[in-house]
Image (cartoon, coloured by chain):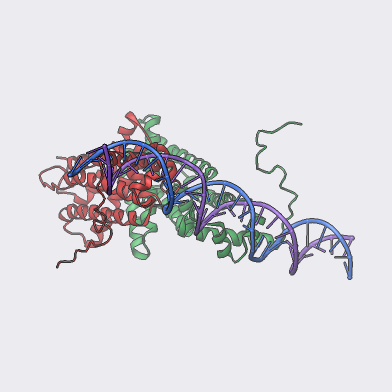
Chain colours: A green, B red, C purple, D blue
Amino acid sequence: MPDNAQTQAQTQKEQPRRRQARGERRITQLLEAAARVFCTTGYTAASTNAIAREAGVSPGTLYQFFPNKEAIAIELGDRLVHEMRETYGEALAPIDPATPLEEAVGSAIDRFMAFNTEHPVFFALMHGPDIPGRMAETHDQLYTTLTGRIEGLLGSLMPGAGQADVTRTAHVCLGIYKAGLELVLAHEGAERAAYVQEVKDVLMRYLEPLVGDRLGRG
Amino acid sequence: MPDNAQTQAQTQKEQPRRRQARGERRITQLLEAAARVFCTTGYTAASTNAIAREAGVSPGTLYQFFPNKEAIAIELGDRLVHEMRETYGEALAPIDPATPLEEAVGSAIDRFMAFNTEHPVFFALMHGPDIPGRMAETHDQLYTTLTGRIEGLLGSLMPGAGQADVTRTAHVCLGIYKAGLELVLAHEGAERAAYVQEVKDVLMRYLEPLVGDRLGRG
DNA sequence: ACAGAATGCGAGCGATAGCTCGTGTTTGTC
DNA sequence: GACAAACACGAGCTATCGCTCGCATTCTGT
């Protein structure tokens, strides 16, 4: 009888629950409602009763599908991260040296911005100071993955730099994106597009001297 | 009979309270304790009982000096803003055209970074999504003031740009600073200093093409 | 010294939020 | 049609948090 280390609350003895189609519908319905409430009030201020009300069900029904409030955010975050992995996988995977840096940065920013503007709750869940403990792990994991990808990109473009410098530069790039995202989400229409362009400019001008002679402007 | 605009809750009818030296000491003691608790747990999660415990007094004593939890954050914020006004007044006031942009940006960043690293609670109070209502006003006011100052600086350096462009650039500058501050606060020692330098670089490279021919690296 | 104000205490009140439980309804399977 | 399981309800339990109140102690002015 090997007692696993993850004897906590993963997939231990919670499989006998056979969901019906109605239940699956309720789950997505509840997650959508939770996303709306989290977006407007934040995680802590969002009450489970408010989420249930937003979904048009009773509190008891909510707890039929989620063991607690944190699990709602966890599941929502997991689904978003899963969807994001596809996005950023395509956005950062091809490190084609033939592609001009401006084009690579531009398309990556476009993809990420599109994802985040379509799912504003992702930003709210990941960067709120009141996120549940498990959520912080998910965020850290995603952040580490992203940083690693950017480091890989920068490493081949900054041959003379040390590992610490590359890591630092990657963090700065992500910080610039995050700050830009906040500005982008705060505006709409043409002004939003203008801010997206600003983020690209900031990133490009920051990176240009680093990669210097390799990928210039013509 | 000039009815002042600040007829709200400033010095209306709360003066008959004559504080003793002991009381003043308790107030600063409570504010320091609150700063510590706010820093570690954030505003919402910080309980008044926890603040009182951290200060080594009873909950009743806390409410002898503050009418409610929000007032603690307000008073703390007001004192920090007051201290910051001196800092940023000196940091942004002199728009001496003879000063190289690099030097101006560098000294401004140094001053702001020094202030925020000495008072980390300021960042926690200003950028948390769970800040009390009145605090948001203070933040907006400070933000508007700062943006206005930066706009004034940029306006004289970007003669060809429209007002919207200048405002957008100012917001981007502040966003870059904010993102950099978060990175700086997350590190210490030499690494922290390196991140400060990165923030300066990002800002400089972002602004250099805008001011172009005026202040080069001659 | 003494009155009154300021300071200090901590059990506890009222409100709220997360969550449960007993009960009734719908759905899938024989 | 019948049985079990999944689904749905909502009043209410429990814990916590902001805050109060009655009372004791310390300080200040006279």
In the picture, the quarter occupied by the N terminus of chain B is bottom left
Q: Is residue B156 left or right of residue A20?
A: left
Picture layout, residue B215 above or below residue B7: above
Judge by depth and name the residue closer to the eye, A198 or B54: B54
In the picture, the quarter occupied by the C terminus of chain B is top left
- Rendered residue at 21%/47% (across/down): B85
Residue A212 visible in this rendered orientation of the protein: no
Q: Is residue A41 left or right of residue B210?
A: right
Residue B182 visible in this rendered orientation of the protein: yes
Residue B27 locus on image (x, y percent): 31, 42
Judge by depth and name the residue closer to the eye, A95 or A66: A66
Q: Is residue C6 left or right of residue A22?
A: left
Quadrant in the rendering for residue B56: top left
- Rendered residue at 54%/52% (across/down): A80
Residue A61 locus on image (x, y percent): 65, 60
- Rendered residue at 49%/41% (across/down): A140
Judge by depth and name the residue closer to the eye, B58 or B164: B58
Judge by depth and name the residue closer to the eye, A10 or A56: A56
Residue B206 locus on image (x, y percent): 27, 47
Picture layout, residue A165 above or below residue C24: above
Q: Is residue B164 left or right of residue A108?
A: left
